[in-house]
Image (cartoon, grey):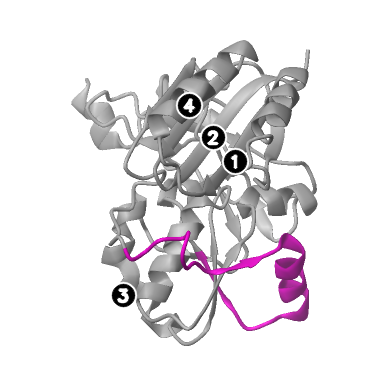
Amino acid sequence: MKYQVLLFYKYVTITNPEELKEKSLEMCKRHNLTGRVILSEEGINFTLEGLVEDTEAFVTEFLKDERFSDTHIKRSEGFGKSFPGLSIKVRKEIVGTRFPKEVDPRIKTGNHLKPEELKKWYEDKKDFVIVDMRNTYEYAAGHFRGSEDLGMKASRELREVLHKLEDAKDKTVVTVCTGGIKCEKMSAFLMHNGFKDVHQLSGGIHSYMEKYPGEDFLGTLYTYDDRLVMDFGGDREIVGTCKRCEDKTEKFQNCANSECNMLFLICDDCMSEEGPGFCSETCEHSTA
């Protein structure tokens, strides 16, 4: 049996999110899907897993709704246990940015740059700044060549680190994130703060890796499910480093110190030596 993970979003006005929640719940259960769904008056954010035939049947039915008919569906291989169950929630935002109401991707957002266009920019050595809008631990596992990590732990922190991009205000900026959803608001926020030439990678890193596996994006893509990381093959470079010994690795785990529980990269050797695995000597000794 082959499983598939669906990843898609859309910023579109939803007049009754609770009604859509009930409809989505019924559809997901009928097609035997698990995953996480966030709905809001500003749009939808779906990550689902199921058998290939079930996921495709869901997509066919879902896209019949005129509000979502042009939604870009991203697909990747699953293993049947990427999610512990099904969660569908209604929230104020589909990405928790807490930006001003004026920052609204439905009205104004960065220019959508197709993967093919970004590839050509790399090949032509175009002068541009590529900014990773994900969290630092996601960046650690994999990132675009020459991209900048802002050091964020959550999307809402963009306000606090915006000063790091001051020199890029009059340059060509490309924002990147996993599937594109964060960049809709992040690029809009940059424009709201005076950035002149702002683009966002259409379909996110996921779409670029599908087309160009192992090229330009170095390492693996962090996923918010039990797969933790994924790639699409290719002769890729491993860029992740073990927090304990700094050897190359792509494996994540949570610190064995329950009071810390930090997600970090750890190599096989340190994992076997440390047993369950601690992120630091401080955490290791505090449990002794």
Disc 1 to disc 4: CB gap under 8 Å: no
Question: Which of marks 4 and 1 precedes in the sequence?
Answer: 1
Neighbor class of circle 1 (other Cα within 10 Å; few <14, some 14-19, many 20+) is some
Residue 141 seen in this snapshot: yes
Q: Position of residue 72 (x, y in %)?
A: 67, 46
Q: Which residue matches tag 3?
A: 163
Q: Residue 166 lies in what quarter of the image?
A: bottom left
Q: Nearer the viewer, mark 3 or mark 1?
A: 1
Give the SS element for disc 4: helix
Question: Which of marks 2 and 1 precedes in the sequence?
Answer: 1
Quick check: is 123 in the magenta stretch? yes
Disc 1 to disc 2: CB gap under 8 Å: yes
In the picture, the quarter occupied by the N terminus is top right
Instruction: Identify the amino acid type marked 3.
Output: His
Q: Nearer the viewer, mark 1 or mark 4?
A: 1
Residue 271, numbered label: 4
| 102 up-or-down from 195: above or below | above
Instruction: Identify the amino acid type marked 4.
Output: Met
Q: Which residue matches tag 2?
A: 46
Question: Which of marks 3 and 4 precedes in the sequence?
Answer: 3
Q: Which residue matches tag 1?
A: 8
Residue 273, numbered label: none
